[in-house]
Amino acid sequence: MSLSLIAIVASIFVQDRVDTDPRQDETITLTLSGAIDIDWVWRSRALTAARGAFGAYGGGFGNLGRSEQVIEAQARVRMDVDLSERVRVVLQLENKRLEGGANVDALGANPEGLNLFAREASISVSDCFFRSLDISAGVIPWSFDVRGTGHPFFWDPAHAASMTSNVLNGVGGGTGAASLTRDNLQPAGLLVSYRTEQWNVTAALLPAIIEGGSAQQDEAAYLISAVYQLLSVGRGSKVGAILAQTSHTVGSGAFSNLITLGAEGAIRQWPLEELEFFGAAYWQRGFVGSIATDAIEAYGFAFELGTRYSSGDAMPFWVEGKVTYLSGDRHQSGADDNIDAFLSYRNASDLLILEDAFFGLNWNTNLRAFIVSSGLSWPDSKFDTQVTLGFCRAAQDVSFPGFSDTTSLGKEVDVRVRWSPTRQMSLELGLAFVVDAEIMRRLLGGSGNPDADNAAQLLTLGGKIRF
């Protein structure tokens, strides 16, 4: 569908003959780029089993197996073709990241990882119809990222799981929070953007975030967003708002339909040049599936507040602190007719074990977290270091059969070191510990399993090559 859409749009907008002859006014420009990420990963057996219980592979409730050592890898190739000054075609192919599997000693533990898929396959036309109006069609990995960190708080479907997967595949009595199916979505449709010096207004029509067969089976989204640059405050200061409607078939003929309204902002270089204040707030309403003939109503809320100090000296240093709240389900009954968890296409990886979808658990709703991180760079030796502390609890109690409810998600410490001898290559080391993770211990069987642990460890050593 997406490639057909590209061909149709291209035939409409590319009317003039395009030639590679240098005597012609119009010449095709082709840019090839790509990357290979390879990581050696060691996970303690508690973390390995918890990922299994959440559905990464194998495992199951209360199943504690062994630690794992695996090689995980992903490759991507990107082609940017400028057909003219205003028309660009992009094709980016990737493989699904090879991850540890039930048979961790075999490369083919998850052979689907060897298949290529289109991360982006789009055609874009700038200044279409009139100046400052841009239109893109196809598979479009657009995200709502006001701060520009690369890890959006709410909307990044190209690097997230289905919006309702963490509830429908949740733990305990239905209070889901984790989903390990990241990077499986290919949001396809139409993106229209109008930009000025201070404004960027975007409308997205994405009828197939997940292609489910018939139109009724697709996961779809329609949204409008606006970002305004506060030029009079400080360079890079922005505020933005988004209104999104998402829907898809939950199963057995039931549907989900969610309306989300949110706002984000970043105030930089005020009152001091080194300071940044940022925040986000979201409200959500709709329904997710049904019980008998009654729709399961959804009410979600989320916010984040934080500040960052950055020094631009010869040895760049930064420190950041933030508070994050993602609402969780307040009711555990199987007959519950509402879901209070905040549902999103969130892409967060501040904490390697609790938040990261590749290395850890991707806990992305029902969360109260206070996270402090700091980094220091040595430009001459090409080293960057970062230390992160996270104090996390579930926003609402998580229940497990045979145990009392708990909100103890854990306290985590991460250390990351990166060496980048060239712009094309980097080596990275990651070390993470989590303790007091009572939710994880009960997930693995609690007092009924003497080997169940409320602590987990992670070690990663990897390299990234780009061309």
Image: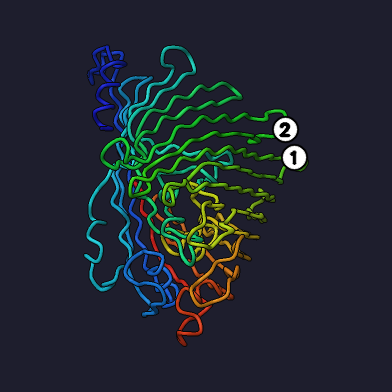
Secondary structure state at the residue bearing disc 2: loop
In the image shown, does 56 or 269 lie closer to the viewer?
56
User: Residue 66 placed where, x, y %?
Assistant: 37, 80
Q: Quadrant of the N terminus?
A: top left
Q: How many marks?
A: 2
What residue would you read off at disc 1? Answer: 270
Residue type marked 1: Trp
Q: Is residue 158 above or below residue 73?
A: above
What residue would you read off at disc 2? Answer: 233
Q: Is residue 62 above or below residue 180?
A: below
Q: Are marks 1 and 2 in contact (CB under 8 Å)?
A: yes
Secondary structure state at the residue bearing disc 1: loop
How many neighbours does mark 1 have within 10 angstroms: few (below 14), some (14-19), or many (20 or more)?
some
Q: Is residue 134 above or below residue 149?
A: above
Q: Single out the residue that lies furthest toward the bottom.
A: 450
- Quarter of the rendering containing residue 405: bottom right
Residue type marked 2: Val
Q: CA distance from mark 1 to mark 2?
A: 7 Å
| Residue drawn at (60%, 43%) of the image | 282
User: Residue 324 placed where, x, y %?
Assistant: 63, 54
